[in-house]
Every structure is written in C-alpha cells, then in structure tokens.
Image: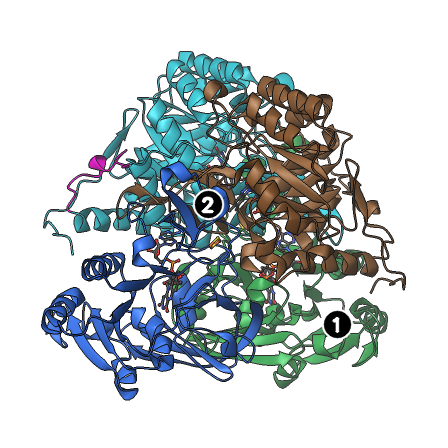
Chain colours: A green, B blue, C brown, D cyan
Amino acid sequence: MLIETADVLSNNLLTGEYRVLVLASPQIGPQVQPGQFVHLRLPHLTEAVLRRPFSVFMTDGATLSLLYKCVGKGTRAMARLRPGDTVSLLGPLGKGFPPIDRDITPVLVAGGYGMAALYLLARQAPVQGIVFAGGARTEDILCADDFETIGWQVRITTEDGSRGDKGLVTEALDAWLRQERTSPARVFFACGPMSMLKAVSQRAQTGGWKAWLSLDRHMGCGLGACLACVQKVRVSPSSPQNEATVKPEAGWTWARICTEGPVFECRDILWDEP
Amino acid sequence: MLIETADVLSNNLLTGEYRVLVLASPQIGPQVQPGQFVHLRLPHLTEAVLRRPFSVFMTDGATLSLLYKCVGKGTRAMARLRPGDTVSLLGPLGKGFPPIDRDITPVLVAGGYGMAALYLLARQAPVQGIVFAGGARTEDILCADDFETIGWQVRITTEDGSRGDKGLVTEALDAWLRQERTSPARVFFACGPMSMLKAVSQRAQTGGWKAWLSLDRHMGCGLGACLACVQKVRVSPSSPQNEATVKPEAGWTWARICTEGPVFECRDILWDEP
Amino acid sequence: MKSETNMKPKLAVSVGGIAMQNPVMVASGTFGYGPEYAGLVDLNRLGAFVVKGISLQPARGNPTPRLVEVPGGLLNAIGLQNPGVDGFIRDYLPFLRNYRTPVIVNIWGHCLEEYRDVAERFNDVPGIHGLELNISCPNIKEGGLAFGIDPAMAQRVITTVRAKTRLPLIPKLSPNVANIAQFAKIAQDSGADAISLINSIPAMAIDVETRRPVLANVTGGLTGPAIHPVALKQVWEAARAVKIPVIGMGGITSAKEALAFLIAGATAVAVGTANFTEPRTTLAVIDGIGDYLTHHGIGDVRELIGSLQTEYTPHDQ
Amino acid sequence: MKSETNMKPKLAVSVGGIAMQNPVMVASGTFGYGPEYAGLVDLNRLGAFVVKGISLQPARGNPTPRLVEVPGGLLNAIGLQNPGVDGFIRDYLPFLRNYRTPVIVNIWGHCLEEYRDVAERFNDVPGIHGLELNISCPNIKEGGLAFGIDPAMAQRVITTVRAKTRLPLIPKLSPNVANIAQFAKIAQDSGADAISLINSIPAMAIDVETRRPVLANVTGGLTGPAIHPVALKQVWEAARAVKIPVIGMGGITSAKEALAFLIAGATAVAVGTANFTEPRTTLAVIDGIGDYLTHHGIGDVRELIGSLQTEYTPHDQ
Ligand SMILES: Cc1cc2nc3c(=O)[nH]c(=O)nc-3n(C[C@H](O)[C@H](O)[C@H](O)COP(=O)(O)OP(=O)(O)OC[C@H]3O[C@@H](n4cnc5c(N)ncnc54)[C@H](O)[C@@H]3O)c2cc1C
Ligand SMILES: Cc1cc2nc3c(=O)[nH]c(=O)nc-3n(C[C@H](O)[C@H](O)[C@H](O)COP(=O)(O)OP(=O)(O)OC[C@H]3O[C@@H](n4cnc5c(N)ncnc54)[C@H](O)[C@@H]3O)c2cc1C
Ligand SMILES: Cc1cc2nc3c(=O)[nH]c(=O)nc-3n(C[C@H](O)[C@H](O)[C@H](O)COP(=O)(O)O)c2cc1C
Ligand SMILES: Cc1cc2nc3c(=O)[nH]c(=O)nc-3n(C[C@H](O)[C@H](O)[C@H](O)COP(=O)(O)O)c2cc1C
Ligand code: FES
Ligand code: FES
C-alpha cells in the first residue's frame, strides 16, 4: 500500500454523467488486483477532509483508470481535472475478488459503475463468462463493449427499456438461470446497488453457488483505522473478521469494508444493518 | 452598486507574482470611478467565506481589468482562472479619488500594486503629472509604460537598485521636492504600504498640500455592514464620518474603509490604530 | 420524481407574535441597519430584519484587525460598535420604517441596568416589532461572566427586561454551554416569547510568524459554514425542550441548511456570514425553501417544523 | 530573511513524565492500534502513539452511517467500538512494543468502576507509557451526563483513577463547557500529570431529502480544520490556568496549526482527522516545526511554548 502523486493523462466524458480518468501510476498501478480500490485526493479541493474511494477500472502497466459518476462535490471537482493536474492516490486498498477457477462459469452482475469494478476481473479471468449489466437508462450502461471485446457475453437491461431488455437486471438473470439449468458450476461476482446485491445473494444461496459481492460504503481513512466503514458479518470460521470485537454469543461482528472487504461472500453478510 | 457574473477574458502573467485579469463587465465596468474597487468571488473557491477586494486597474467600455499579486489562497486560485471561467463581481464600491483640477500638478506615489489603483486616475486626469513608482525589485514595478504612454513622467525606485534609483520611493520624492520648489500647486495621490502612505502624508502636511491616500485593509462585506474595515479618523467638519458613533469629546471616530474610503485626505487619518 | 402541486406553498410563520411572510431573517450584525444592503436586496422580501446590536450609549467596539477568515468560516471581534439607542432611533430607524418587514432590534448592555434601560427606551418607539436580547456577548461587568453562560444571571436579565418591555422578547443564547436545553427552559420560564441561537462560538487565531493573535481583541467568535452542524444540534435540543418558537442560525449558505434547521424544530432561521459571501443569500434561501416544498408536495412550511424522523436507537455499547 | 543557525533545533519535550523525541502525537481513534498506518508512516518517528479508546469489555459502537463530511470537517459517531482491554493487550500491544515510541492508551468506561478497573488492568502491562482518560464521551450511565461536563463528576473520576494507576494520567477534556479553565484546574488538583484537549464538538447533520439524521446515532462529534480556532482558544485558556502540560489538538493539518497550539501554551500536539486526508501529516508537521525553528533561529521547541505576545488591551466599549 502506497501513496503516489499521479499525473492526469486524460479525463474524458463516457456517457451521461460518467467519465474515465486515466492517471500515470507507475507505483500503485502494477500492484492492483481485481476488486481493489484507490483512495483519491484532489489537491485543488482543499475543503474536502476525506479522500474518495474508487474501484480501479483498468490498469495497464504504469497507468490506472477510474470510471466514475459525478454525484457530489468531489466527483464534480474530478470532472474539472485536465492533463497537467495531479491527484494523490492511496492504494491499492482492500481485499479484492478471489481468483476465478478454470472449471467454473463466472457470472458477473453489475449496476451502473459496478461494471468498472468488474472489468479487471473479467480481463484477468482464465475463462470467459457472462455479464449482466443493468441501469436506469442507456447512459448507465457502461463499457459493455469492453467486455465483448475480450469475449464475454453481455446481457443488458435498462429500467426504461432504452437499451437491451426493459426491467431490472435481476429479471434478466432469473430468465437466464431458468434456461441454463445444465451448468451448475458457477460463481457470481457482483457490484452495484444494495438491492441488487441482495437479490444476487438470494439467487446464489438458493442455487447453492458462491457469490462475491463488492460493497460500497462511505469511507474515512480507507486503512482500517477509523472504523467508519463497518459491515455486520456472520461469525464463522471462514468469515473475515475483526476478531477482537467479537462477542461470540451474538453470532455477529463488524468487518471493515476498506480492509476485510470491499468484497465479501454473500453468506457472510448480515443485511439488517443499512 | 451591482452584482454581476463576469466572464474571464484573459488572465496573463505580468511580472513575478503579478497578473492582470480581464473580465467582461458590461454592467459594473462603465460605472467605475478612479480609486473605487470591486469585491470578487471565485465560484470554484467554495471554501472561502469572504470575497476579495481589488482596485479597478482599467475599464474600457464593457471590460474591467484587475492587476493583482498572488499572496494567498484567494489570489493563487485567481491565478488558475482561464477564459471560460466566471467570477462574481460586487461593485463599484467605495469612494474614489476626488477629481483632479486643471490648475494643479498631480503627484502620484505608488508601491507595488498601488500603481494599479492610480492608473485609472491618471488616464482620466485633465492634466499630466508625475508618478513615483517604488518596489523591492524590478518585478514590483508595474505598468510604468502605461503611464508613460499617456504622457506622464515616471520616476522609478527599487530597494535593490535593479531598476531605476536604488532606495525608497520617498527618497526619490524628497529629491524631487527639493528640486521643484517653484510649483507649489500640487496634490498628492498615493496607494501602497502603510509606511509609504505615512511618509507621503508627512511631506504633504509639511508642504501644505493635500494628499489623498488609498488605504488597504482586509474586508468583510465591502458594503458598510460588518464594521470590520474601520479606520480611526479625526472628527472635523470636512472629514467623512460615521456620525452615529462619534463621542465628540474624544475627537475621533471610525470611518469604514469600504464605504467612507478607501480614499482619505491625509489630515483626516489618525495613525495610532494599525 | 415527486408529484408537484400547482399551489404555491405557504411560507408565513409567526414567531412569538411577530407575523413574518416567510421564515428567513437576517442575523444581527451581518446586515447593518438597513441601507447597507438595500441596493442589492429588496428588504420587503425578508421575513424579518434584525439590526446590529444596540446599547444604551454609543460604543466604539474593538481595535482592528476585527475579522479573519478561517477554514469554513470567519472569526470576528467587532466588539459591538454601534451608535447607541438614540443614534439608532434618530439616524437609522426612519429608513427601516419605509419597509413592511418587521424590525427586530438586537440589544445588549454592560450590566443588568443597561439591558433594562435600553429595552425600556424602545417601548414608545413606532416601527419596532421585537427585541432580540443578546446575552451571549463577552466583556460585560457583572461577575466577569457573560449572562449567557450562567443560569442564574440569564434568568435575572431575561426576567428584568421582560418586566420592562411590551415587545416580543427573544433572548439569543450562547452556544458555549454544556446543556443548551437548560438555558432554553430558563428563557421560556422567564417570560421569553421565542429564543434565537446560536451566537458565534468563542475562538482564536494566531499568526505564527509574529507569534501574535491575528485579532486585536485576541479572541473572537467563529461563524459561517463550519458552525452549522454545531448549531443544528443545539437548535434540535432547544426546540425539543421548550414550547416557544426557536430561531435557528449558524452557517446557512443555501436553502439546504435553512431546511435542516426547520426540520430540526426551528420556526424561523437567520442568515449571517453568508451575506458577506453572497449578498443575496436570503433571497436564494427563501426561493429554495419554496421550491423544496413544491417539489415535496408540502403545502405549508409549518408542516416541516420539527419533522425530523429519528427511529434509530443506538446500540448499547 | 531571518538568520538561520546551522544547529538542528531540539524537538524533545516531556509530557507528564513521558519523554517524547518531538511534540507530535496521533489523536486517539484516528490512527487505529498501530498496524493500520505502519506501512505508510514510520511509527518510530512519532512523539507518542495514542491508541483508540479502550474499555473494560469489547464494545460494538454505533450502527452505520458513522461518519459524514461537513464543511471544513467531519462528523463522527463511531461509538467507541473497541476490542476491550484484554483483546487490546493480546492482539495489538505486542505489535506496538516493536517500536521505540511511547504508547499512551486512551481509556473510557460506562461508569466510575469501569474507568477504575480498566486503568488498573494496565498497571502490570509492559509497553504502556501513559493513560489518556477520555471523560468527554457521551452515552455513559452515571447521572445521564458525561463526566467531562460536570465538575464534580470530573473530579471524582480523575481522583478515582489516579488512586489506582502508576502511569502518567492525562484526562482528555470536553470542549462542550462554558469555562475550560475550571476543568483544567480540576484535573490538575485531582492529580493529573497533563491534560489533553479538545475532543470532538457535539454536532449533527440532517439529510433534508429524507428528513432523517445522516448519522445513525443522530448526533456526532465535529473534528477537523473547522474546530481549530475553537480548540486554540481553549488550549490557550487551559494552559494559562494550570502548571501541568497541555496537549493541544483539533484541526491540525500542517505545522502551522501545530505551531499555533505550541505558541498558545501546549507542550505537545496531536493530529487527528488530517491522518485521513493525508496519512503522512504527522511527519510533515514534525518536519515543518523543525524548519520553522531553524528559520526563526530558535534552538529548542520549548522556547516556543506559551510564547504568545498579547500586548493589546481591548477598548472599553
Ligand atoms: C470501494 C468503493 C469503490 C467505489 N468505486 C466507484 C467507482 O468505481 N466509480 C464511482 O463512480 N464511484 C465509486 N464509488 C463511490 C464513490 O466513492 C462516491 O461516488 C464518491 O465518493 C462521491 O463523492 P462526492 O464528493 O462526489 O459525493 P459527496 O458529495 O460526498 O456525496 C454524494 C452523495 O452521498 C451522500 N453521502 C456523503 N457521505 C455519506 C455518508 N457518510 N454516508 C451516507 N451517505 C453519504 C451525500 O449525501 C450525497 O447524496 C466507490 C465507493 C466505494 C466504497
Ligand atoms: C480597497 C482595496 C484594494 C485592493 N486592491 C488590490 C489590487 O489592485 N491588487 C492586489 O493585488 N491587491 C489588492 N488589494 C489586496 C487584496 O485584496 C489582497 O491581496 C487579497 O485579498 C489577498 O487574498 P488571498 O486570499 O490571496 O490572501 P489571504 O490568504 O486571504 O491572506 C494573505 C495575507 O493576508 C493576511 N490576512 C488575511 N486576513 C487578514 C486580516 N483580516 N487582517 C490582517 N491580515 C490578514 C494573511 O495572514 C496573509 O498573510 C486591495 C485591498 C483593498 C482593501
Ligand atoms: C461580523 C459579525 C457581527 C455580528 N454582530 C452581532 C451582534 O451585534 N449581535 C448579535 O447578537 N450577534 C452578532 N453576530 C452573530 C450573528 O448574528 C449570528 O448569530 C452568527 O454569525 C451565526 O450565524 P452565521 O454562521 O450565519 O454567521 C455577528 C456575527 C458576525 C459575523
Ligand atoms: C473517527 C474518529 C474517532 C475518534 N475516536 C476517539 C476515541 O476513541 N477516543 C478519544 O478520546 N477521542 C477520539 N476522537 C477524537 C480525536 O482524538 C480528537 O480529539 C479530535 O478528532 C480532534 O482532533 P482533529 O480535529 O485533529 O481530528 C476521534 C475522532 C475521530 C475523527
Ligand atoms: S474507512 Fe476507516 S476503517 Fe474503513
Ligand atoms: S468591509 Fe464590512 S463594513 Fe467595510
């Protein structure tokens, strides 16, 4: 884990409110594993006390790309970055996705910028699988072409029907699951809104498959120190946990999304906390 | 007095840490009188609660220029403005210099960006006079050419002797005063560091001439409401004053630099307040 | 998208008997005595006009520097410079009488008697709609402590002024206390018609190069966006402790912070420091509250007051 | 240009018997228990390491959201989640023992007995150099009020712990009081070796769209640059009231704010929220203090402590 001052190489509009920021990152870039994130600071945004976490969309030798959506003051300030500016990167952070086995079918489910968090996984996978991409509108369907280029099947759903099937991404997933009864050796990887993650978790547990979910929570330090980003997880021999705060009789403990996560197997997550 | 959202037309480096910001200001620009100022807000500098006051260097129909020195976070953020950006202008503010009579010799004394505050006065004057420009180094001598172009005599002094005479601007002034004994009908106009203003005041009072000094004080509202920018002034029939707070027996009262000033006749100023 | 009604939402509120067309006031000391902002802001659009603190005699305030910008806010030590009650009535009040907007006079004194006398002086003066009693200013005689941080003194000054004034009385509380609800209750029990909070938070800045205080007065009061979360908690606690209306202030820069105060229980709000940043902030706040109500299908701003939902109960640790 | 000496300035200070190579510590709760930042910051360079608050039993803290950014700062309501005294000693302390830096444990309890017992538990534990007594946390039993805002309770808890611990004892004071000097004196008179201040300022944020509090715990504590001017004033007042050393904290982001605390009278300082913004802030602060001393020709940081010049006396108003 490192801090690096990274030069902005480009910062282009993708679609709607989404942009791709490409940074020169000779130190952190090469170390990133799929599902890990970086914690970013804009030197010109001096009033922001917190860094902002972003999944790494792509790394390519000494460069690192982030695919981001403009939602607030941090991301709007990011949109103003131009070549010649620099940002401070802290990373790579967190525990990413586990490696994909040759003998399974990876099933990726993404909502909005969740596609960005899954692309590196797909690129490094030893087998091609299928990715379900969902969003409200055409603009929320990101980098589908990139997945197709590397040989993955892409199923698109939008809530307004403006691209792909009309409906929720989980409806397309359900239709596919009903159809593809013969391939039980699958593992799910998902990133997107909480409701989508819960739906994927439910399908996986019903079918007896593993599902690795990448959680998104506002963060403080990103380093495991502030305990802002905690998630309730089950106490089990396999679950990642902050041993010291276990009260065993309660059956649950906190895991830090920035350190033990952001990726958790769905059975370890206790959903009653928001 | 108006608020105007002004487009940045250019923002060029002048010399050293000085820059000239040219703004499209069809509303405020044409109203500005010599010695008045504008209160400026940078929309991107959201963490700054206060506007920043700047004398108007030049107005030309619908444009308005500021000549500024980068000294802190506001002026450093100003240096990053580019065409396409906008700023918020509040102005014109304050009471500027009195008009120059045809039958006197105007003597201008400026330190650093004080030259900017005096240029409009020189341009609109019915007679040409002499301007004494002082600074620490060559870089602090600003727009001397502009004064020469409009037919003014310019005497330059720098503390390190890198341009003009070596020494303080008041030394050059004193030398000139000793020499030019025959022209008693003069009025001083000065803008620059407090020590320079005090020296000019002392020369003017000794010689029996008027001296109009433009004071520089950190400001809050710029509108006369917050009472942050006050200056001790003598209570006299001629002095500008905030009548309501006079305790006549004390012989002094506060004047608001943003409203009754920034220009005061030197005899009205009480220097014991910093 | 929420359904939007076509009706214009109602913005009028009543604060301790003062009828306001909307809940947005200006905070004392940040808008002068009227003329200063009148060229930029139509004073007739304001919910109420609160003038800079007035004392019995003219007061010179502190030496300069009196103001410094700090991260997220401002430190000021103006020292309550003002023309005195007679100067105000003679030189400024006639201007304010030209407007429909209710005028609330912020008053202060060095001692109990001054508070009493300045309040009494306004009884026969037309064009005054209420008194805001600043009990959160430093530098006053009695006991060396501000009236606003000593429960017994707060009670005494409010009771004393209450006995002398016919006008709606609005003590302005100090944020510099451990338990704001206690002071809110004291104000209510002493006969206040409303309370306003918060005043600036005691603070200080040092120039490390010269090793001197930045402000001539050494210490000052912190205001602006930085104090909004602190003010919001105090307004929430005060509003739950009393039945009289609360006027919330501290760090309002847009409708968002004003709405937060209303939701936390304030009946009206005041804009202070933001007037320096954007002179027309009050107008943007009034319009923004209207837009919010329309967007959320709320017909009357009073439905918003105290509508905070807090179903969470913290774990026991 | 000031004359610069060639000698490296001395940075060492002693705080209540704890010898520190420099006056820069980390603030409790913002740097974890050691391993979290060790990959980025050489812990051997710190003046002292203060661990996150430890209680007798493990504590789960509050539900989420626990943190939100506000203008100039941060609101947090972590709720003192921690592994308990035994968990800390077993799982974390061995790591910290690998470093030369003094370790100060921040402790808290729900009641007097818990404070006493957790303090006592550290008496026989090697590798602990001091106890910071957090008497400024909410949610504790006795009387429903925090120990830190009630003079009698503050006195009782400090006296009780003092009687049980051999270690240097450093009460951490609440900023949420009208008169900080009073609490500083209580700490000194109750046997404290030093005091630290300030803890976070009680505050709140509301999401106006949902009309709910942003933090699950409803209220939280404000920290970061926004609180520096408030902290500076309290440190200045506390340092003038007592003889024991004061540790200043609140809003340090660079050497500038740290120097201001020292000049105001603090013997040491702690960096909190800024660790999240720039993990290496402590190192920049240490280097920056050294550079400042060199530039100003000051040979020893102790010459700076309490060197504020305040010749101004405010006008009488
Ligand atoms: C591991 C991880 C990976 C991520 N990857 C990506 C990515 O690849 N691409 C991408 O676009 N985004 C990603 N995000 C989300 C991204 O971090 C946020 O969108 C970004 O931080 C928003 O910053 P902002 O300043 O623009 O918005 P802000 O102004 O900070 O806030 C935006 C919204 O969030 C709310 N909010 C702010 N703080 C909190 C809080 N503490 N609790 C609850 N709500 C809060 C605000 O009210 C507002 O509605 C990721 C987040 C995590 C945790
Ligand atoms: C009427 C008037 C006309 C002016 N005209 C010009 C002009 O034409 N060109 C030009 O370059 N400048 C001009 N100035 C000065 C200009 O306003 C300042 O340089 C500018 O505001 C600095 O802003 P900043 O954010 O860059 O610096 P800041 O970061 O705000 O501060 C710079 C320095 O000032 C100190 N400082 C900040 N606040 C205070 C305070 N309240 N009291 C004392 N010291 C303080 C800081 O400590 C720092 O050392 C004028 C000022 C006035 C009042
Ligand atoms: C420059 C200035 C002067 C002030 N003068 C007064 C005053 O005379 N009387 C008073 O009760 N409050 C005074 N205040 C406090 C404000 O009325 C208000 O309570 C405070 O600024 C918080 O609001 P804000 O954060 O919106 O500024 C003053 C504040 C500022 C910034
Ligand atoms: C996330 C977080 C957790 C904290 N936890 C504790 C704690 O456990 N015990 C304590 O005494 N103070 C705690 N504090 C307060 C800090 O130690 C410090 O007093 C405060 O943050 C002010 O300093 P700063 O402005 O530099 O952050 C915490 C602060 C933050 C931001
Ligand atoms: S963000 Fe600080 S512990 Fe995870
Ligand atoms: S700057 Fe506010 S009165 Fe002059």
Residue D185 at least partly seen: yes
Q: Is mark 1 within 8 Å of ligand 1?
A: no
* Residue shown at the point (43%, 45%) measured from the top left: D251
Name which residue type carries label 1.
Gly
Q: Quadrant of the N terminus of chain A?
A: bottom left
Depth-wise, is mark 1 or mark 2 nearer the camera? 2
In the picture, measured across the screen, residue A162 lies left or right of residue B130, that is right
Instruction: Return the x and y of residue C215 as percentages of the image width and height.
Output: 38, 43
Q: Determine if the magenta segment contains residue D304.
A: yes
Question: In the rendered structure, which segment of residues is drawn in magenta?
Answer: D297-309
Tag 1: Cα neighbours inside 10 Å, few (<14), some, or many (≥20)?
many
Q: Is residue A270 above or below residue D231?
A: below
Q: Determine if the magenta segment contains residue B134.
A: no
Instruction: Return the x and y of residue C80 as percentages of the image width and height.
Output: 50, 39
Residue highlighted by disc 1:
A134
Quarter assignment of residue D171: top left
Mark linked to residue C75: 2
* Residue shown at the point (38%, 68%) measured from the top left: B97
Mark linked to residue B111: none
Q: Is residue A119 above or below residue B222?
A: below
Instruction: Return the x and y of residue D188 as percentages of the image width and height.
Output: 37, 18
In the picture, measured across the screen, residue D61 lies left or right of residue D225, that is right
Chain designation of label 2: C
Of residues D118 and B94, the one drawn nearer to the viewer in this rendering? B94
Residue A97 at least partly seen: no
Quarter assignment of residue D50: top left
Q: Are marks 1 and 2 in contact (CB under 8 Å)?
A: no
Of residues C10 and D158, the one drawn nearer to the viewer in this rendering? C10
Secondary structure under tag 2 reads: strand
Instruction: Return the x and y of residue D260 as percentages of the image width and height.
Output: 33, 42
* Residue shown at the point (34%, 67%) measured from the top left: B70
Q: What is the C-alpha distance between the residues marked 1 and 2?
A: 50 Å
